[in-house]
Structure formats: structure tokens, C-alpha cells
Image: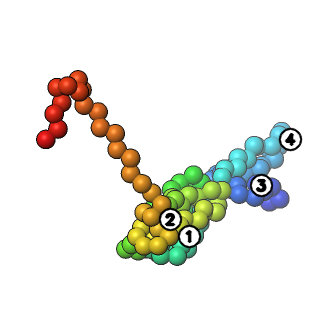
Amino acid sequence: ACKHFSCKAGYQLKDGSALICHRTGYFTRPRCEAAHCLKSPWPPKHGSKDSLATCAGISSGGVCPLTCEDGYSPTSAVFCDQGMFTTGKCESIVGPGSKADEESLSLMLEINMPYKLWKPE
């Protein structure tokens, strides 16, 4: 095996794949794949460390579950992307500056009958 072969940053040599020169003068073709995330990510502020503890070793593109302390809600998932985790965030769901202060509810009611037959109580 050729010890000087390596994959680009964010990629790793696929299991069982190596650059080998055969007696015929031809080389095998090693394969690189997106790197796994080897260590569990650190939880964001107000995030639960226990929810991320099982994330070590997940494949690139894998999702790591994020739970937050009471009164906080995750605003994004944590993904493994080529050996690095994206950053999750826990935001307050109540109080000043919370998403609840900025959101509103819109409701549309559809009644399948002519207005003259509809009599609200």
C-alpha cells in the first residue's frame, strides 16, 4: 500500500480502500468518502449535553438530535458535515426577545355552505 496517498480535507479513505501497485504496473483505485464526525459536539448555550452524547461517529449528512433546557427550543438541527458538526441553537420560547414575541397566528376558516345558510351561534 502507498502510505503517501491521502484524501482532501473533510474526506477520509473508505474502509478497505488503499492505493496498491500490482506487479502488472497498475494501481488500485482508492476511494474517499465524506469524513464521519468522530467526537460528539458541544451543546449550545441552554442545550442538553446528554442529547448529543450519542452523536460520535455518525456519517456525514447525519442528524444529531438536540434538546434544550426547559423554556428553550432548538431552532436548528445539528448535522455532521464532512467531519465537522454544524452549530445548533436553543432560543427562549417565552419572555422578552423570544420567538413567541415576534410570531403571530393567522387562521382561515372555510365553511362549505352559502353565507345565507350559515348562522353563527
Question: Which quadrant would the N terminus be assigned to in this image?
Answer: bottom right
Return the x and y of residue 46 as percentages of the image width and height.
47, 76
Amino acid on which disc 3 is placed: Lys
The residue pinned by badge 1 equals 41
The residue pinned by badge 3 equals 8
Amino acid on which disc 2 is placed: Cys
The residue pinned by badge 4 equals 25
Q: Nearer the viewer, mark 4 or mark 3?
A: 3
Q: Residue at x 13, y 41 (%)?
A: 121
Upstream in sequence: badge 4 or badge 3: 3
Upstream in sequence: badge 2 or badge 1: 1
Total marks in image: 4
Amino acid on which disc 1 is placed: Pro
Q: In which quarter of the view is residue 115 placed?
A: top left
Q: Residues within 10 Å of mark 4 (few under 14, many from 20)?
A: few
Amino acid on which disc 4 is placed: Gly
In the rendered image, the vertical position of residue 72 relative to residue 30, given as above or below: below
